[in-house]
Image (cartoon, grey):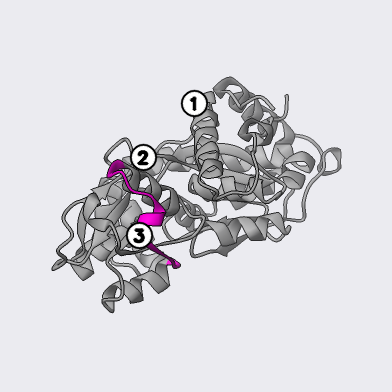
Amino acid sequence: MPTLSRRQLLLATAAAAAGAARPAGAQALPAEVRIGFQKGAATLVLARRQQVVEQRLKTLGVASVKWVEFSFGPPMLEAMGAGAVDLGSVGDTPPIFAQAGGSPLVYVAATPSSQHAVLVPADSSIRTLADLKGKRIAFGKGSSAHNVAIKALALAGLTLKDVHPLYLSPADATAAFNGGKLDAWVVWDPYYAIAERHYKARVIADTSDKRLASASYFLASRDFATRYPVVLAAVLDEIGKLTRRAGQRREELATVAAEATGIDQKTWEAAFDRAEFSFGPVTPAHVAQQQQLADSFLALGIIPRRIQVADVVWQPPRP
């Protein structure tokens, strides 16, 4: 399936706007749109607070939007694959596992990934990535941190077979890290910023190194994208506009995120200072990057079968 070009995304937006002018019975509409989000996805936290998606969808005749919080990406995509969530944002790795597992999901937009880091305790003797050999390293299985961990180890000539991986959610890893049960932790913002500011974690590598960097993606259930393309295009249009505005008002966004999550504002400011705020279509470069990731995971025996990422990229509606 061909990728979504910027021109196609603009056409999809035009189709969504045109759909708003039609009578309610003239197009297929869901009774409710269910959006999955994580605490680290601050623009979605802001979207939920400001209800920009709700306001836009009301013009189309959609009655409500339900926001469903997840601790990290894999559980969100499991829920999406089971039909409990319609769309959401995750890192680069969860979609690979989901597609390999046969989940009926499609890529619908791309945005830069939040910053990730390989963290160690302040008093650790670990100074370089090579020092991780034989150590206990935590990250979420199937999360974007899983990919960062593999890439970081590879920079030192290591693989997961050279370390003791511990597959922990951010909450469980936080407790283990603070309890001295981990030698290293690979995680994303705001957990990265929390660990730095509150637990004095030390960074030995992070995704400012372009060899470790990646993108994040918005995915939707294939059924939702097929049945309600105009609604999906409208949701993406609003999230895109809000993302660009948020990048120009980072301090304001930090205030909103702190109020919504209970994580202090200074921590959010630290996370946003190193974040990139942009939003757009899934490009051929994104597809190539994801395909390379999928092929690497297959070669490492991490996923069970070969997949073609281009087969699950959404086609927007034509106006």
Residue at 73%, 34% in the rendered image: 19
Asked which quadrant contains residue 140, the reply is bottom left
Rendered location of residue 225, percent (x, y): 72, 41
In the picture, the quarter occupied by the C terminus is top right
The numbered dot on residue 73 is: none
Q: Mark 1 and mark 3: span between their CA atoms?
A: 31 Å
Residue 177 position (above or below residue 247): below
Which residue matches tag 2? 213
Secondary-structure class at tag 3: loop
Rendered location of residue 64, percent (x, y): 68, 58
Which residue matches tag 3? 163
Residue at 53%, 41% in the rendered image: 299
Query: Viewer-nearest of labels 3 and 2?
Result: 3
Q: Which of 185 and 261 is in front in this view?
A: 185
Secondary-structure class at tag 1: helix
Q: Which of 224 and 53 is in front in this view?
A: 224
Q: Mark 3 and mark 2: span between their CA atoms?
A: 22 Å
